[in-house]
Amino acid sequence: MNKDYYYILGISSNANIGDIKNAFRKLSHKFHPDKNDGDKFFEERFKEIQEAYETLIDEKRRKDYESNYFKKEDTNENYYKSFEDEIKSEFNKIKEEREKFDKEKEDFEKEKQNFKSINKTYSVKEPLRENIIYSNNNNNNISKYFYFIFALAISLIVVVSLFYILNQLNKEDNLAVEGIPKIQFEQNEVDPMINNNNNNNNNNNNEDMAYVEGGEFQMGSNANFKDESPKHKVNIKSFYIDKFEVNISQFKNFIDETNYKTNADLLGYNYIFDKNYYFIKKTNINWKHDEYGNLINVYSQDSLRPVLRINWNDASEYCKWAGKRLPTEAEWEYAASGGKLSNNYIYSGSNNLNEVANYGSGKIFLVGSLKPNELGLYDMTGNVYEWCSDFYDDDYYKISPNNDPTGPLKADVTYEYHVYRGGSCMYYEEDLRIKNRGRTYYNETAFKTLIGFRCVKDI
């Protein structure tokens, strides 16, 4: 180990716990992969930042590091700036190499097209002798082709016969299962909440939703990140909101009824965690799988996990089907804060993160596993991020209307980012604050972030 963790975090060797946390928060906000569209370069840099933070924040590990690996030097006030410049310089070099490669590739394609064009213009017919040789060879191979076609026909007959037999057996199995209650699947006992999910998706049913009485609250913060400021008054009208994040069982009902294809289904691939909790690409992965790519048994309690690998469009389509919609960012923050019942907690429902949030574990819990907030809403902090309906803009709070803001117009944003809120099981304290904002593209890039959703309904 020869890394200078103090240099990486941009702090002096005499830094206290508060300095370490503040440095990590600033670096995370700039260099976290989720803030940079999942770029592999930033994934690697963030590993170094996280390793430095986890070592220095732990008193025992910090002492061991200083005793065995680190030589204290004079305080350098330019550590953070120097490391930031180092990352930017390295990234710019990679960017230049990518652009150079793309240019060479483009030039190569042009040369290839020119070569094909010239080759067509000056092509010469084959000599008669070559035609004769080809004709003789063709005649000699007729018998081989005949036997090949005959063997292929026999194989097809066998395959079709097997397919027909299996299909008949499958029909018999389905008929047999139709009369058996789900509770009889002994290996994976069904939670009663799963059966409730089958009946809670019609347009007139407000069960498992909480009433949020409208009111005024202070949105944003002046004490943290730039995009959270300025703190400003917002008035919200009353609405209903789901008590839980939409789970796999509920999403399955939507798919079964509409035959909808998610973006992941259409792409044919998605991303899963590797053993180090970093995303890797894998084919045939969609909403039916957990964060590690394991297929979920939809008749087991695991189906009460929040649905994953859902982009903004997929979430919106589900909400329409359920007669609901995605919450605005303002509605989400108001509800997470507890509405009119708010105790002004840092996190949704408590100042003690362990009471209300699954965080830092890298493993997703069943919905509703921890304590709810003042309105009876579960998992507004941690577990998985949650989509909001708004487009994202760094400076939107400066021009946001005071009454029921719905976010910037699409025409007013440079990039088509959408807002997500709440933090996830992958992150730590700073990312889990109620006021913290997140954003990503609504398309494939979103699959590299653990994002789920819940719905709201107008009154």
Image (cartoon, grey):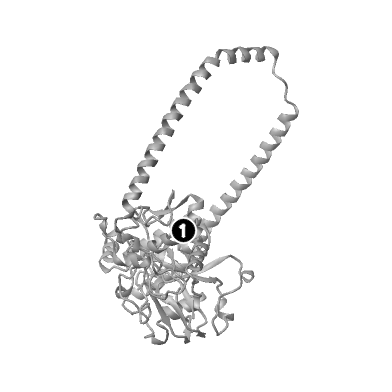
Q: In this view, does 78 lie to the left or right of 354?
A: right
Crowd rating for badge 1 (residues with CA inside 10 Å; few <14, some 14–19, many 20+): many
Q: Residue furthest right?
A: 121
Asked if residue 131 is positioned above or below residue 405 in the image, the reply reads: above
Looking at the image, which residue is at 40% across and 64% down?
250
Relative to 248, residue 137 above or below: above
Residue 360 visible in the current orientation = no
Image quadrant containing the N terminus: bottom left
Where residue 195 appears, as percent x and y from the top left, is 33, 65
The structure residue drawn at horizontal position 34% and vertical position 64%, both measured from the top left corner, is 304
| Residue 458 location (% of width, % of height) | 50, 78
Amino acid type assigned to the residue bearing label 1 in the image: Phe
Dot 1: element: helix
150 sits left or right of 198 in the view: right
Task: Read off the residue under disc 1.
Answer: 447
Residue sitting nearer the eye, 265 or 324? 324
- Spot occupied by residue 267 in the image (x, y as percentages of width and height): 51, 51
330 left or right of 12? right
Residue 276 appears in which quarter of the rendering? bottom left
Front in this rendered view, residue 362 or 215: 215
Query: Front-most of 71 and 95?
Result: 95
Q: Quadrant of residue 202?
A: bottom left
Vertical placement of 68 versus 242: above or below?
above
Q: Quadrant of residue 201?
A: bottom left
Which residue is pictured at 66% across the width and 15% down the height?
131
Q: Where is residue 213 in the image (x, y as percent from the top left)?
A: 44, 85
The answer, for residue 184, to whether it is visible in the render is: yes
